[in-house]
Amino acid sequence: MGQRANLILVADRQYELYYSHWCANTLPRDLFWGPDHATKFVQIQRSVDESGWLDNIWAEGGAVVDRDNKVLMLFGGEDVLYDVPLRRVYLQMLQRVWGQWTVRWAHQGIADLADYVAYPRYLVCSEWHDDVPDEASPLAPPERKDGTNVVGTVRLADGTVRVFPLAGSVASYLFAGPDIVAHCPEAEAVDCERINEWCGDSFPLGGFHIDMAAKSLDYWTAFYAPEPVGAAMMWPGWQVTWHRDRYESQVLATDGRLAFPFSSTETLQQRVSEMLLRESRLGGVAAIRQFTNDELAKGSKVTVNPWALRNDDLPLDRTARERIVAFALGAVDSDSP
């Protein structure tokens, strides 16, 4: 149980690694308030040696605060990790607060952080072969429309485009390889303009576009993605491109007809503001303490990782947060996302 994260502070051409058991979900809020506050937040976490690096299975969040080059790279959060339009508004606001710093999203999670400080990527990356299905996943819609979180599009050799609302992960379809093309029946397809009926108010977590004539596969993901090299191995002879979170690539591939569900800029601003102004809480620590006490009362033997009982928060009073959020809102483009 936990929301584990690695945090890295770079200064004087050296980096120091830190570990937090609970901040992955709150990291976008914890780091929002500017470089000095973020630096202090990182420094109160548990300092660890290289054995404290998490891998892409355990790292649910992380950040690099590079004071030498004025770079912030991060990933995590309960909302912005999965919602691309929401994240873009958040990053616009974050950039305004951080001023002259370069703000980046770590699209490959902990691997991007390791790359940044020249720590061997292979030491933090587990193999993706566990996601390889035994057989091609059919391009069939979920039983319930609100179960749609992936959008697949296929351009047939005659130029016809078929759109498939799907459930699961992008990886489960990519690793099926070209055989998946045999599973794109017209009966399961929907009109481009109707895909939002399947997504509802939720923006997809990813999508892919297959062009039969061009033998090309393009995909995008809201968060962690299969290594492009690994995906390409499943599509020999095809051009495979990962567009990170640029869902626009799929819209262009369907001649602009694919209509994803969008919230208004005002709605996204409100959601980000509520996230940033939410009061800190020690829910995970409290839950573990309660569980431990309950088990001890039953006479059970319980061993608890001491770091699971540590949640190092750096509170900022609400008035200061409201002032910073109001300033940050001035950065949001009315045409977002």
Image: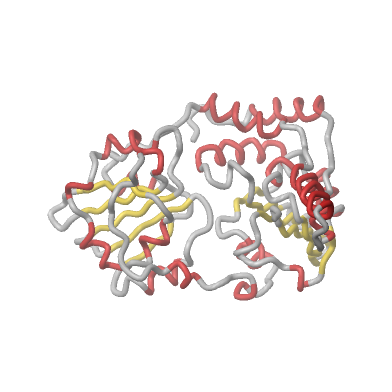
Q: Nearer the viewer, residue 331 or 273?
A: 273
Dividing the picture into quadrants, the one containing residue 47 is bottom right
Residue at 25 percent across and 58 percent down: it is 211
* For residue 130, above or below residue 312: below
Picture residue at 57% right of the left edge, 36% below the top: 89
Left or right of 330? Residue 280 is: right
Q: Position of residue 337 (x, y in %)?
A: 49, 35
Residue sitting nearer the eye, 222 or 296: 296
Q: Quick one: which residue is furthest to the left in this view?
A: 158
Q: Position of residue 32 (x, y in %)?
A: 72, 40
The one nearer the camera, 238 or 223, is: 223
Give me the residue at 73% from left, 52% from top: 70
Q: On the picture, is 86 further left or further right than 305?
A: left
Q: Residue at x 28, y 51 (%)?
A: 140
- Is residue 37 found left or right of 145 in the rendered image? right
Residue 73 pos. (x, y %): 66, 53
| Side of 213 where 286 appears, left or right | right
Residue 153 spot, x, y in % from top left: 28, 50
> Tell me, what colour scheme is on the image?
secondary structure
Looking at the figure, which quarter contains the N terminus? bottom right
